[in-house]
Amino acid sequence: MSGGVDSSVAAALLKKRGFDVTGIHIKMWSDPDIPCTLKEDRLDAMRAAAHLKIPCETWDFTDAYRREVVDYMIREYAAGRTPNPDIMCNRHIKFGIFLKRAREAGADCIATGHYVRLEPEFPISNYQFLKSSRAIENLRIENPLKIENCKLKIAKDSNKDQSYFLWTLTQNQLKHCLFPVGEYTKPEVRDMARKLGLPTAEKPDSQGICFIGEIDLRRFLQKYIPKKSGVIETASGRGIGAHEGLAFYTIGQRQGLAIGGGIPYYVAEKDFSRNALIVAEGPYDQKLFKKEACVGEMNWIGGSPPKMPFSCEARIRYRQPLQRCIVETETGNGKSETGNSKLETASLKVVFSDAQRAVTPGQSIVFYKNHEMLGGACIF
């Protein structure tokens, strides 16, 4: 229970359906120099649990979060890439050590407030959160072991769908997971929270990094990554300013460039060989768009890759409308954005029907077909 409305309602739904529920609030690492809401969130989680009359515990994963999420984030930015800390938090913390500890403590499953639908396939029938109260029985300890395959489907509320952040999960993890709010829209969840009298009913959604919150990212990174100033150039090679270090910028960025002249400039490329930041002139500059992406470190939710090549839809950032593409085996040796080593882990090429704006190294590409999330990969 994060202290937000979604996990509070998830706990309420499970209790209503007869599950024996214990609320767990995860304590994460926080920077003492950056304001955060960790204490307030913990109190909100405890208040919601008390209102629901369920036990609530706090589990301290500070060291693991620092190692698996914060250090990863700093390392990726230092290498010139733009990481997804929320995805790593899900992979290593929520569905990693938290799931492991919960199972060791005797739990059959863990549940979160993610907006996504889980469709487990049993030898006999599916049961996950159907509307009829007769369609679900209390989950027994043997049931997760009988699940043959789990599919992740886009949430009912497509605007809140969070499947993008769950592409690293495996069948061994998913068969012990529940996502109660995935069958509802956000307004429906808010309405349920109000009717239940939950203290989190009107709490705004978190907009920041998973369990850290809203931070000044450049200020945070400059505590750990030294500045290395260089030139800002247009695609034609015209110098128009200076940057503080390539690590502090991301592809597609407009704000924070400190370039005057009335033209909206956008980060289009990082030239590490010259420590130069290349910018596009205006939002429709072709320098910002690519039709292909080299990707690696794939994970397929079903456990095995589809037969290549195959057609599907994909998104390269959260809430981006799905884009038609073809995924095929990469035959060449791709180069990293830093221009250094070969991408030995990159083995797929994604060819989009339409050129994509700001294809960003380090970010995730997630694949879909017929409302099902198939898996994902990292963009190189």
Image (cartoon, rainbow, N blue to C red):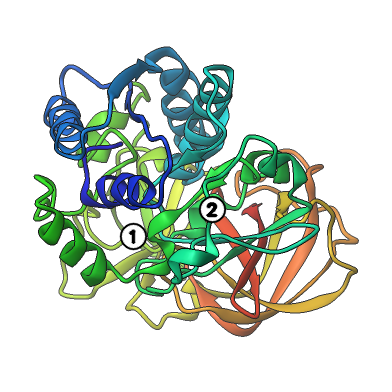
Residue at (77% x, 65% y) in the render: 349
Mark 1 or 2, which is nearer the eye?
Answer: 2
Picture quadrant of residue 343: top right
How many residues crowd mark 1 within 10 Å: few (<14), some (14–19), many (20+)?
Answer: some
Q: Residue furthest front?
A: 134
Residue 23: image x %, image y %?
32, 31
Compared across the picture, whether 306 is left or right of 224 comes to right
Quarter in which the N terminus is drawn:
top left
Q: Which residue has dot 1 on it?
A: 253
- In this rendering, the answer to whether 237 lies above or below 264 is above
Q: Decide: is 28 above or below 206.
A: above
* Rendered location of residue 280, percent (x, y): 39, 70
Amino acid type of the residue tagged 1 in the rendering: Gln
N-terminal of the pair, mark 1 or mark 2, is: 2
**Visible in this render: residue 20?**
yes
Q: Which residue is mark 2?
A: 137
- Left or right: 352, with 47 as reference point: right
Q: Are marks 1 and 2 in contact (CB under 8 Å)?
A: no
- Tell me if residue 359 can be seen: no
Residue at position x 76%, y 56% from top? 302
As helix, strand or loop, the secondary structure at mark 1 comes to loop
Q: Element at badge 2?
A: loop
The residue positioned 21% from the left and 71% from the top of the image is 187
Residue positioned 79% across, 52% down in the render: 148
